Amino acid sequence: MFGKSWEKAQGTVIASKPVKTSGDGSVTIYEFVVDVRTTSGEVFRAKVGEPRVATNFWRPRNGAVVGVEYDNKSRKVRFDKDDPTLSFKNFKTQQDGSFEATLAQQPGTSPGVGAVSSAAAGLPPGVLPPQLQALIESAAANGNVARLDPNSAESIALRDMLLRSGGVVQPPPTTPTPPARHAPPDA
């Protein structure tokens, strides 16, 4: 039989690098190292390129868990274009919503208060641990929040550091489970 038999899976982006840039520097094409988790539980590492027709492709960041498709026989992997976390249109909709939420706030309120969330940081919902989310919201309410370009190297490094400090090594699945609560030891 000719062609490939693509199967859906989850992938964690481990690394990325630019492979070519247009002559005017306006477009850069990346390739990615992705750990692929099949539905049977097998994990393998593969190199994945950007989709050839990428008009709606939003480049995932290192650590992102995204939908992928793989061919079991050849082990070739491609991004799942149906995954909303890889959609530029979905990202733009979230950004527009965050902008509108900021516009609707009371005058004198710090930008982003009420919109400081996983979505505002470009992350799937529920990624930030509740304690970290509460700390960010408290700081924002007091005007103690620095606004960075979400795509800058500094912003990405800061977000990754905050997630690691909150115990998040990689974003959890789409439906996060609440952290286990332990009873205090008897005195």
Image (spheres, rainbow, N blue to C red):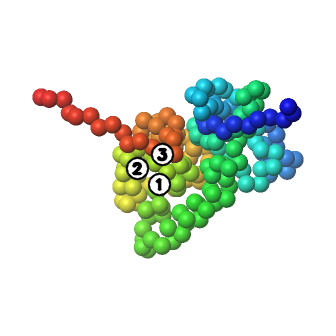
Q: CA distance from mark 1 to mark 2?
A: 7 Å
Q: Earlier in the sequence, mark 3 or mark 1?
A: 1
Q: Earlier in the sequence, mark 3 or mark 2?
A: 2
* Residue at the image position 42 percent from the left and 73 percent from the top: 106
Element assignment for label 3? loop
The disc labelled 1 sits on which kind of residue? Ser
77 sits left or right of 140 in the view: right
Residue 179, compared with residue 88, is above or below; it is above
Using a 10 Å C-alpha cutoff, classify the residue at mark 1 as few (fewer than 14 neighbours), some (14 to 19) or many (20 or more): many
| 65 and 27: which is toward the camera | 65
Which of the labelled discs sits on residue 9, or is there none? none
Residue 58, position as x, y percentages in the image: 68, 50
- Please name the amino acid that badge 3 sits on: Thr
Asked if marks 1 and 2 touch (Cβ < 8 Å), the reply is: yes
Say if mark 3 contacts mark 1, CB within 8 Å: no
Q: Nearer the viewer, residue 161 or 117?
A: 117
Q: Quick one: 11 or 88, which is closer to the camera? A: 11
**Sequence-first disc among 1 and 2:** 1
Q: Position of residue 1 (x, y in %)?
A: 85, 31
Tag 1, which secondary structure? loop
Mark drawn on residue 117: 1
**Residue 100, percent across and down?**
54, 69
Can you give x and y, in whole percent of width and height, for residue 66 in the image? 62, 42
Q: Quadrant of the C terminus?
A: top left
Task: Check disc 2 and report the residue beneath it.
Answer: 133
Q: Which residue bears the numbered disc 3?
A: 175
Front position among marks 3 and 1: 3
Distance of label 3 from label 2 (alpha carbons): 17 Å
The answer to whether 75 appears left or right of 12 in the picture is right
Q: Residues within 10 Å of mark 3 (few under 14, many from 20)?
A: few
Residue beneath the point at 36% across and 55% down: 138
